[in-house]
Image: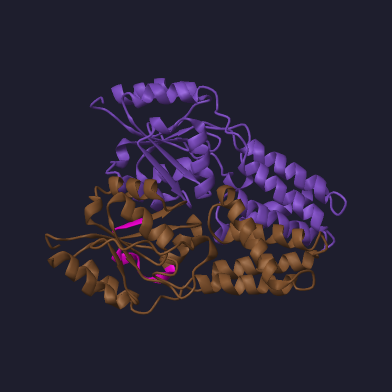
Chain colours: A purple, B brown
Amino acid sequence: MAATALSIAFDADDTLWHNQPIFERSYEKFRSLLSRFHEPTAASDTLIRNEMRNFDLYGYGIKGFTLSAIETAIQLSDGAISADEIRQLLDAAKEMLAHPVELIEGVEEVLKQLSADHRLLVVTKGDLRDQERKLEQSGLLGYFQQIEIVSEKDVASYRRICERHEIDPAQFLMVGNSLKSDILPVLELGGRGVHIPYHITWAAEQVDEPAAVPGRLFKIAEMHELPKLVQLLTTA
Amino acid sequence: MAATALSIAFDADDTLWHNQPIFERSYEKFRSLLSRFHEPTAASDTLIRNEMRNFDLYGYGIKGFTLSAIETAIQLSDGAISADEIRQLLDAAKEMLAHPVELIEGVEEVLKQLSADHRLLVVTKGDLRDQERKLEQSGLLGYFQQIEIVSEKDVASYRRICERHEIDPAQFLMVGNSLKSDILPVLELGGRGVHIPYHITWAAEQVDEPAAVPGRLFKIAEMHELPKLVQLLTTA
């Protein structure tokens, strides 16, 4: 490992593999299920509001999403939704949980290349079981020295991770698609962030683009640009 | 810390605080909700079977339990359960998730005493968010050097925990109420187990009492007997 080795942490959903499109299809199914009771866009807006209100109790992930979807369906149909329609929401949850993992282009090559010189980690939030399943199915586990599945990605959780693995935040580089969860708290901790936007951003993750932080905040369009950026950072 | 210091890991639910009674009340509510469709005992037996079948996708915890309860209610009522009754299952989930933490008698004293000479850990399974909430509310966090929330308690997960924290399994003592999750895999790994039975055991955790393993498997009736046992083990 080079003297200038970094600890490079990767977000998982929509950074290593596609995730938001699976949820988008579920929102679409939800809207169509509710369409006989309610105007479609308003229906999924109410679902998203209920999800956000329930985060504190449910946390992130498919199971909490599904409980919120059932709650919202009952609410918007004024109790007229049928048991069979609710069963369709349960079936959709199981499909989402069993959905095959589809890697984002270039991920495996980039991890292979970077793991030769740097310590790689995964830092992801969501349901423990579901994230473990996806990591296992991804075939990427061998590239990572640490896997951290957390219930919230905030400054405190990144600080705990750095302390636990004896990582100096100045040598910590977080790569992810969410400014709110992957980038802003890491900058606040004194680390560096690489933002790789995904083509859809979940409503609960939307924040304004922060002001430039030269030398600590980077934005690239595709995963395969990462090794070149890391090389620049470690030879500067 | 004494030269004979152990790493003592505690299960959380029904070892540090009461948990199963909260689920028992939910099974009772479920039976009574279904009573107009189905014979009560058979109703909760079917729910438990569905829970077990769904573990692989849902993992452990209140959210998965609730999704299985809704599924079972639709199944056993042949779709005749009303949206309002399903909402009662959702309300019950939120109550369970917000239920105050009630410590088991003697826990705090015992942790205080043992933490002076030994490294204490928590090893628990279930929903990440829910276990974190309970740990925080318990007021016990200060006694533990490591918190491990895992999706399954098997030999592989205990091995990972020992490796991660550089614990020799021979110096690892696991304390818990479940023979299946807390004791048997730890014995298989070469560690020691202290079984403190709780007055109710969840159906999915029931296994036959194992044969005696002298010097490695201990059974005590109450948490407050633990320090004396630990003293015997470290001065033998």
Q: On the rendered structure, is B21 left or right of A28? A: left
* Residue B221 belongs to magenta span: no
Whether residue A199 is situated above or below residue B111 in the rendered picture: above
User: Which residue is farthest front?
Assistant: B211
Q: On the rendered structure, is A90 left or right of A149? A: right
Q: Magenta segment, which residues? A: B137-147
Camera-nearest residue between B4 and A81: B4
Whether residue B14 is situated above or below residue A50 in the rendered picture: below
Query: Residue drawn 37% across and 79% down?
Result: B105
Query: Residue drawn 63% across and 37% down?
Result: A99
Query: Residue drawn 73% across and 66% down?
Result: B87
Camera-nearest residue between A137 and A40: A137
Q: On the rendered structure, is A26 left or right of B65? A: right
Whether residue A53 is situated above or below residue B99 in the rendered picture: above
The image quadrant where one finds the C terminus of chain B is: bottom left
* Residue B141 belongs to magenta span: yes
Quadrant assignment, res B219: bottom left
The image quadrant where one finds the N terminus of chain B is: bottom left
Query: In the rendering, at what x and y percent does residue B221 appear?
Result: 35, 76
Asked whether the viewer can see residue A12, the reply is: no
Whether residue A54 is situated above or below residue A163 in the rendered picture: below
Query: In the rendering, at what x and y percent does residue B157 appear?
Result: 38, 48
